[in-house]
Image: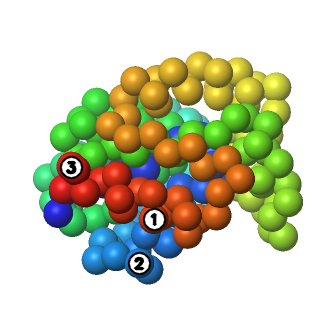
Amino acid sequence: MKNVILIGFMGVGKGSIAREVAKNSHYMTMDTDDLIESMENKKIKNIFEEEGEEYFRGLEKKVALWLEKSVTNTLISTGGGFYKQKNIKKIATIVFLDSPFDEIIKRIKKHPNAATKLKKRPLLKDLKKAKELYDLRRPEYLKLSDIVIDVTKKSALDCSKELLKKVKKYA
Ligand code: S3P
């Protein structure tokens, strides 16, 4: 099986959908932010605060090169900016999880851990700036993707079923 990579804006549900796919298929799953936190033994928020965004993007690059060289048969969830890695097309079939900005924010806010979810994402601190980032990125996500899944008002289970059906063509 070829790798599958999930891209999309912060809070769209990449992690939840990846876990659901892993539960219902033979894919193993890993997350680029989790790999970075293990590498640095530090939370993403602290890497941003102490080392800065550029340093974080360098770690994403290191992960991207390793994924291309060493990982197969895996469903990879990513941080919202990982799609900028130049070799991403070589790593996997790319699935973009799409939803309007307001729906994403609503989704985060209704989560029982909403405060934590917002706090751990430095680029979501200022919602006006986050919306600008969303508007800039959405066309880029769309352009890059092999498959688009509209996740609005769908459960992670339903999205995972749709994903498994659609990736078959690329396996
Ligand atoms: C980022 C998204 C975050 C994390 C970092 C930067 C981004 O991941 O990688 O805070 O640039 O969009 P999530 O998409 O899981 O929130």
Q: CA distance from mark 3 to mark 1?
A: 15 Å
Q: CA distance from mark 1 to mark 2?
A: 8 Å
Q: Are marks 3 and 1 in contact (CB under 8 Å)?
A: no
Residue annotated with mark 1: 161
The quadrant of the image that shows the C terminus is bottom left
Q: Amino acid at mark 2?
A: Asn
Rendering coords of residue 70 (x, y %): 16, 60
* Farthest left residue in view: 69
Q: Amino acid at mark 1?
A: Lys
Q: Is residue 151 above or below residue 21?
A: above
* Residue at x 30% of width, y 54% of height: 167
On the image, which quarter does residue 101 sit in? Answer: top right
Q: Are marks 2 and 3 in contact (CB under 8 Å)?
A: no
Rendering coords of residue 36 (x, y %): 44, 58
Depth check: give the residue in front, 119 or 162.
162
Q: Amino acid at mark 3?
A: Tyr
Task: Kindly tell me whether mark 3's CB lies below 8 Å from ligand 1.
Answer: no
Residue 24, which numbered label? 2
* Residue at x 73% of width, y 45% of height: 104
Residue annotated with mark 3: 170
